Amino acid sequence: MTHLDADGRPAMVDVSAKAVTARAATAECRVKFPAAVAAQLRKNGLKSAKGGVVDTAIVAGTLAVKRTHELIPFCHPLPIDGIRFVVDWRGERELEIVCTVTVTHRTGVEMEALTGATVAALTVYDMCKALSHAIVLGPAKLRGKRGGKRDFGDIAGKA
């Protein structure tokens, strides 16, 4: 386990010996609405009584990416190079939120992308909960990452 020291105590990984490289990660989170709520949101251009759902979710997700190290104990604070959100309907009732984060650093941005996507989804829930509490979040998952020791999956465009 990389977050344990020789005595088995929690410890942040020392990345000082790693090479600085371009890194990127893409994560997604889905928001599933009851049929009537999805229809109402489509009719209202994804606006609720609280305002523009997608724009607010993107702002919240962006803030979350930049503060991931304050939320997840062993994440390094990173000088984020770019953040990109794509939010679109998948089928009649499901909104897909995709967050891609880029950085040039010694460690990757998987946690930042996952945090951005999930906080954006939580914000959609908050913006729409007056319409229904039957809104379901998830799954949240890493779609892909580039840079570091190994690449995985697909990166959705450039941030």
Image (cartoon, rainbow, N blue to C red):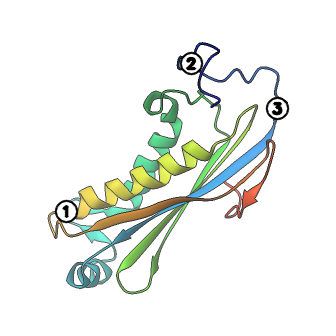
The residue labelled by disc 2 is: 8
- Identity of the residue drawn at 70% across and 20% down: 14
Q: Secondary structure at mark 2?
A: loop
Taking 153 as reference, is 120 above or below it? above
Q: Which mark is residue 31?
A: none
Relative placement, left or right, of 62 versus 121 is: right
Viewer-proximal residue among 31 and 57: 31
Q: Mark 2 or mark 3, which has the lower sequence index?
A: 2
Question: Dot 2 surroundings within 10 Å: few (below 14), some, or many (20 or more)?
Answer: few
- Say which amino acid is labelled 2: Gly
Of discs 2 and 3, which sits in the foreground?
2
Depth order, front residue of 13/134: 13
User: Residue 137: image x %, image y %?
Assistant: 35, 63
Q: Write the residue at 25% across / 56% down.
A: 126
Classify mark 3: helix, strand or loop.
loop
Amino acid type, callout 1: Lys
- Contact between labelled residues 3 and 1, with CB atoms less than 8 Å apart: no
Residue 84 position within the rendered picture, expressed as x and y whole percent measured from the top left: 59, 55
- Residue drawn 48% across the image and 55% down it: 117
Tell me the distance, in whole angstroms, between the alpha carbons under discs 2 and 3: 28 Å
From the image, which quarter does the N terminus lie in?
Answer: top right
Residue hosting label 3: 20
**Residue 19 against residue 47 in the figure, above or below:** above
Name the residue that disc number 1 marks: 129
Residue 30 x, y percent position in the rendering: 43, 67
Residue 20 in the figure: left or right of residue 40: right
Residue 79, position as x, y percentages in the image = 65, 31
Packing grade of label 1 (10 A; few <14, some 14-19, many >=20) is: some
Q: Quadrant of the C terminus?
A: bottom right
